[in-house]
Image: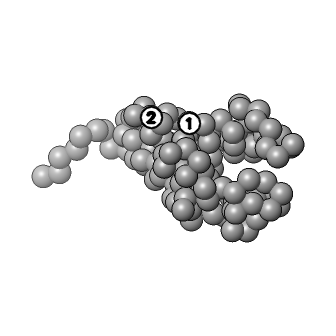
């Protein structure tokens, strides 16, 4: 005897949507390294130690050993318009938009575009 939960050929839309909605896998530092290589090396160098822009491996050191996640997101996406060595940081918010993932910002899970979260993970991983 066959037991069916739904009439033959009919599966509720909620079941289909649940199957398609796989949990978002969080981006990792290696994902961010690729984004950094494509967008940031011209100013910060391949090793992120400077060049025409500031040394990105010493962000935490310049902030009493704490990597300032919220501030870095603001600088990268263009919300914060800081001047670095006489030049403004370009805005990358539009190019780093799209699907979001939850990023812990000061104890609050904040929806953040995946590419921006990946870049943040990379920058945090290279702190000296």
Q: Determine whether the residue tagged by mark 1 lies in a helix, strand or loop.
A: helix
Q: Quadrant of residue 94?
A: top right
Q: Please report contact status of discs 1 and 2: CB closer than 8 Å, yes or no.
A: yes
Q: Is residue 15 visible?
A: yes
Which residue does the image show at 71% across and 31% down from the upper left?
Answer: 79
Q: What colour scheme has been applied to the protein in the rendered image?
A: one colour
Numbered label tally:
2
Relative side of 1 to 87, left or right: left
- Is 53 above or below relative to 7? below
Q: Quadrant of residue 89?
A: top right
- Is 44 above or below relative to 59? below
Residue 102, how many percent across, how many down?
47, 40
Q: Determine whether the residue tagged by mark 2 lies in a helix, strand or loop.
A: loop
- Whole-Å distance between the Cαs marked 1 and 2? 8 Å
Relative side of 69 to 86, left or right: left
Residue 106 disc label: 2
Residue 17, how many percent across, how many down?
44, 40
Relative side of 104 to 113, left or right: left
Which is more toward the observer, 79 or 13? 79
Residue 70 disc label: 1
């Amino acid at each position: 005897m066959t037991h069916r939960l739904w009439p033959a050929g009919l599966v509720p839309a909620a079941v289909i949507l649940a199957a398609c909605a796989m949990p978002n896998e969080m981006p990792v530092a290696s994902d961010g390294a690729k984004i950094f290589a494509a967008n940031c090396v011209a100013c910060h160098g391949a090793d992120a130690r400077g060049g025409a822009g500031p040394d990105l491996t010493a962000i935490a050191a310049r902030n009493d050993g704490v990597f300032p996640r919220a501030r870095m997101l603001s600088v990268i996406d263009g919300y914060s318009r800081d001047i670095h060595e006489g030049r403004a940081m370009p805005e990358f918010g539009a190019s780093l938009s799209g699907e979001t993932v939850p990023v812990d910002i000061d104890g609050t899970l904040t929806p953040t575009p995946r590419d921006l979260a990946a870049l943040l993970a990379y920058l945090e991983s290279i702190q000296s």
